[in-house]
Amino acid sequence: MKQKVRKAVFPAAGLGTRFLPATKAVPKEMLALVDKPIIQYGVEEAIAAGIEEIIIVTSRGKSAIEDHFDTSFELEASLEKKGKTALLEIARYCASMAKIAYVRQSEARGLGHAVLMAKELVGDEPFAVLLPDDVIAGTVPCIKQMVEAYEDVQSSIIATQIVDGPAISAYGVLDGKAVEGKPKLFDVSGMVEKPKLEDAPSKNAIIGRYILTPAIFDKIENLTPGAGGELQLTDAIKGLLETEKVYGFSFEGIRHDAGDKLGMLQAMVDFALKRDDVGPGFRDYLKSLSL
Ligand code: G1P
């Protein structure tokens, strides 16, 4: 019987040191692109893909994420009293958009370990993983494209994009070959986390969207520390290859690395320009700059 992807895991336990001092007291997932926290873009993407349950892996100091997706009676009462209906809708939507469960990762032991924390909540079914730092804009949400591909192949799928030059060393990198008749899929035969440029098996970098089968949990449990001394999700997926097929997936859309300062700035410009409210004024401002 064909299985559906109903759950999505959001690893959000990292310290976000690349954005200090902004992230000293504010979770990096709560940094905003214009006026929306980056994690909300991911949650909305998952909902648009038909995901029914969101699982967010947090850690100490991340309570702002829980507050964001919860009711704020004080705020709502104040907006209601002032008749600010549109803002009231926005506040209410945050608290009602999804069924969200939280689980803590008490030690920073890597992305694989963070995903393992969701094992009980996911259970024995395929699930999506969205890394909130990777904000992807597209006509069809990236994870929706992948959920549809999963319905066809019923195997784990990793989003991938071409990365040229030394920048490849910041990613997991896939090895494999094209699949005949399925132009977006890539038959994965191996992968390596953050290789040196000369050791990278290809230019196919892993982007932070995955559909994984529940067999991944067993693989994570049996991992030894990999790149950076951490339990790497990439290594666990490589382990899956011993028993299952894994596909790379060339998605349609533009991916922004909002975990990086330059990437965050680029995302901000792109998202602001697309907005009906601030877009036109922002465009005029950019045009007026003598760069
Ligand atoms: C993680 C993954 C890596 C992937 C990247 C995409 O790395 O471990 O395989 O290429 O996300 O953003 P991180 O950026 O958390 O170091």
Image: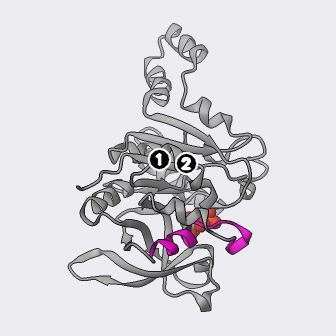
Residue highlighted by disc 1: 122
Whether residue 7 appears in magenta in the rendering, the answer is no
Please name the residue shown 67% across and 34% down the image. 63
Location of ligand 1 given as a quarter of the image:
bottom right
Task: State the residue at coordinates (53%, 36%).
Answer: 101
Examine the rendered structure and indicate whether residue 193 appears above or below residue 140. below
Few, some or many C-alpha atoms within 10 Å of disc 1 (few <14, some 14-19, many ≥20)? many
Indicate the amino acid at tag 1: Val
Mark 2: few/some/many CA within 10 Å (<14, 14-19, 20+): many
The label on residue 118 is: 2
The part of the image, by quadrant, that contains residue 136 is bottom left
Determine which of the numbered discs, if any, sits on residue 167 in the image.
none
Residue 291 can be seen in this image: no
Q: Is residue 231 magenta?
A: yes
Say which residue appears at 45% left-offset and 77% top-offset: 242
Residue name at image x 46 percent, y 51 percent: 273
Among the 4 quarters of the image, the one containing residue 96: top left
